[in-house]
Image: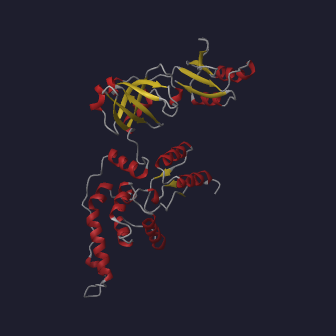
């Protein structure tokens, strides 16, 4: 039980947020950062809510859009009474199809609940209407007690249902369905095709956009999650958008000049490569788009600086000593910038050119552990 405690605790938190997609996504991201494995919903392994199965958190069936609690209970009671479902058709044979209706089954298929049954989602979806007719006819026949003249089992009148095979849906289509029905991508991420480019070339950390510098141009690679055109008072067109990647999201602004050039090249769920600056004038930073880049023209980023932000304004030789030790213990090629609070705007001071440091995660963790340090990051 102790070994499973973090998973059990997180499963309880996920269950509490099962009706809130945004919060649910945050908790799932946090669970992954903790090293916890989260499996998609499965017709034979999922319970009503999030549970732990063999050390892994399993998505609850109630969390699937269009899966009502009453219908989920029908599935779980049948499974508990007579064992797991051997196949998709076995499930249709055993549950009340008035409770577990077509709309719910479509959602369960699209969410991947039957992926372990070796029939792809597109085939199940395409055959669903005929499969339901077959299963219901079989139930009706059994209810009337019809048997063959020779006393054989009535099932002999019903040869096994044969699925008309269909090529599976493209990965992006499956991911869109998962996001819509579960609030999260399980079988991959729309950006996976561009992951190497993102790792090498994306210069803006969307987990911490507040760490960015207002005057520096940044390359941003991410998914276009929302796009809202807007007319200014003088009649010009611009747009507001949201860009998301593996780490987080940021609001983006296309001013009239950039919007006019890019509007025909932008579509929701596209992966885009943008150049722009970060606006820190409001409480939440936003990205001001200057132009769109061709991925082939994007150069890999290079980390050339480590930034340290202090908690306080009064710094002494004693309080700074741990920072000096951390820097001297980890020589490298990165310049060091110190962010110091004052009565006015934050001051940024560059350390002597003779002092440089490595930008490894271990170094950053050590710097963040120092009491006077509020944050440390590489750029």
Q: What's the residue at 44%, 58% (across, down)?
A: 42
Foreground residue among 163 and 75: 75
Q: How is the image coloured?
A: secondary structure
Q: Position of residue 97 (x, y in %)?
A: 35, 70
Residue 265 lies left or right of residue 240; in this view the side is: left
| On screen, residue 63 above or below 72 | above
Q: Is residue 364 above or below residue 305?
A: below
The image shows residue 48 at horizontal and vertical percentages of 49, 62
68 versus 187 height, above or below: below
Observer-nearest residue: 310 or 320?
310
Residue at 35% of width from left, 36% of height from top? 228
7 sits left or right of 191 in the view: right
* Res 310 → quadrant: top right
Q: Residue furthest right?
A: 318
**Percent coordinates x, y for residue 346 in the rendering:** 59, 21
Q: At which x and y percent is residue 106?
A: 34, 59
Is residue 266 at all visible to an observer of this figure?
Answer: yes
Number of marks in the rendered image: 0
66 relative position to 379: left or right: left
Quadrant, the N terminus: bottom right
Q: Quadrant of residue 292?
A: top left
The answer to whether one can see residue 292 in this image is no
Position of residue 126 relative to residue 226, above or below, is below
């Amino acid at each position: 039980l102790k070994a499973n405690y973090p998973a059990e605790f997180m499963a309880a938190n996920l269950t509490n947020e099962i009706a809130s997609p945004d919060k649910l996504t945050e908790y799932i991201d946090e669970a992954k950062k903790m090293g916890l494995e989260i499996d998609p919903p499965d017709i034979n392994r999922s319970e009503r809510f999030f549970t732990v199965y063999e050390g892994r958190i399993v998505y609850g069936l109630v969390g699937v859009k269009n899966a009502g609690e009453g219908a989920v209970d029908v599935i779980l009671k049948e499974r508990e009474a007579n064992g797991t479902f051997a196949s998709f058709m076995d499930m249709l044979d055993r549950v009340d199809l008035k409770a577990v209706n077509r709309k719910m089954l479509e959602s369960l298929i699209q969410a991947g609940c039957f992926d372990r049954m070796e029939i792809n989602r597109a085939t199940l979806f395409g055959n669903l209407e005929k499969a339901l007719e077959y299963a219901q006819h079989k139930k009706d026949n059994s209810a009337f007690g019809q048997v063959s003249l020779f006393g054989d089992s009535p099932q002999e009148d019903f040869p096994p249902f044969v699925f008309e095979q269909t090529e599976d849906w493209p990965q992006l289509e499956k991911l869109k369905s998962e996001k819509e029905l579960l609030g999260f991508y399980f079988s991959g991420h729309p950006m996976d095709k561009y992951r190497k480019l993102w790792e090498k070339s994306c210069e803006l950390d969307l987990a911490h956009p507040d760490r960015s510098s207002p005057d520096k141009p940044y390359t941003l690679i991410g998914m276009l999650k929302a796009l809202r055109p807007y007319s200014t008072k003088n009649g010009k067109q611009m747009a507001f958008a949201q860009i998301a990647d593996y780490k987080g999201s940021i609001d983006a602004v296309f001013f009239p000049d950039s919007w006019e050039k890019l509007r025909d090249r932008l579509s929701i769920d596209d992966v885009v490569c943008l150049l722009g600056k970060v606006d820190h004038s409001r409480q939440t930073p936003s990205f001001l788009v200057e132009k769109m880049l061709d991925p082939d023209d994007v150069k890999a980023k290079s980390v050339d600086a480590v930034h340290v932000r202090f908690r306080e304004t009064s710094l002494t030789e004693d309080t700074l000593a741990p920072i000096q030790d951390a820097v001297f213990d980890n020589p490298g090629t990165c310049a060091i910038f110190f962010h110091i609070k004052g009565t006015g705007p934050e001051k940024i001071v560059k350390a002597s050119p003779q002092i440089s440091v490595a930008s490894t995660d271990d170094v950053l963790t050590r710097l963040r552990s120092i009491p006077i340090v509020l944050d440390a990051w590489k750029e």
